[in-house]
């Protein structure tokens, strides 16, 4: 049983001990995955940055999104295949608009996405699909 107490500025969640260990393990796994991914994607920052610039400069979208994955996906255009390039992750280039069209982002959440989206010249927007699930990550370009 999980108890949730809502206070004006704070939410307290009380969970049984087995769940706490699982949550802590997931947080550690998530942090480890992010660190590993940043290391593995470091050599790809330049080509991904150029692809992001092209998406914006060609008027395709102001919101390029890179789908980072290890399995087959049906979103975006493949630009890096992990098997062909000898890297850990495959990458497809997509856009906010495609995410909306494919109902990955609901239309009533577009403004929220735009608010958290970081400048393309400074960050790469990654949609990472891993064994831990799917999450957006903003990776600094420099």
Image (cartoon, grey):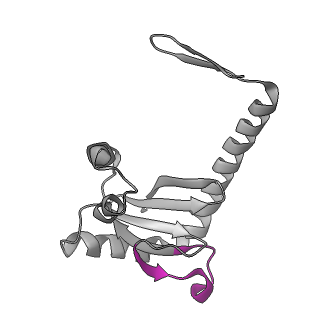
Residue sitting farthest toward the left = 59
Q: Residue at x 36, y 61 (%)?
A: 99
In terms of depth relative to the viewer, which is nearer, 125 or 135? 135
Which quarter of the image is occupied by the N terminus? Answer: top right
Residue 11 magenta: no
Q: Residue at x 75, y 31 (%)?
A: 20
Which quarter of the image is occupied by the C terminus? Answer: bottom left
Q: Using residue 17 as the reference point, say whether residue 42 is left or right of it.
A: left
Q: Using residue 95 as the reference point, say whether residue 125 is left or right of it.
A: right
Q: Is residue 6 above or below residue 88?
A: above
Where residue 34 appears, x then y in whole percent? 60, 55
Residue 81 sits in quarter: bottom right
Q: Residue at x 60, y 62 (%)?
A: 37
Where residue 22 appears, x then y in whole percent? 76, 39
**What range of the chain is rendered magenta?**
76-90
Residue sitting farthest toward the right = 18
Q: Is residue 55 above or below residue 128?
A: below
Residue 80 magenta: yes
Where residue 19 appears, x then y in whole percent? 76, 32
Residue 96 sits in quarter: bottom left
């Amino acid at each position: 049983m999980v108890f949730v107490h809502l206070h004006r500025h704070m939410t307290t969640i009380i969970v049984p001990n087995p769940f706490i260990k699982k949550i802590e393990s997931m947080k550690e796994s998530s942090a480890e995955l992010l660190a590993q991914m940043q290391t593995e994607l470091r050599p790809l920052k330049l080509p991904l940055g150029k692809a992001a610039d092209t998406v914006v400069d060609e008027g395709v979208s102001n919101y390029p999104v890179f789908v980072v994955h290890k399995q087959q996906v049906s979103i975006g255009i493949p630009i890096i295949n992990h098997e062909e390039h000898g890297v850990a992750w495959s990458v497809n280039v997509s856009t906010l608009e495609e995410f909306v069209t494919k109902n990955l982002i609901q239309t009533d959440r577009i403004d929220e996405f735009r608010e958290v989206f970081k400048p393309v010249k400074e960050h790469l927007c990654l949609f990472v699909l891993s064994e831990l699930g799917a999450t957006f990550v903003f990776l600094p370009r420099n």
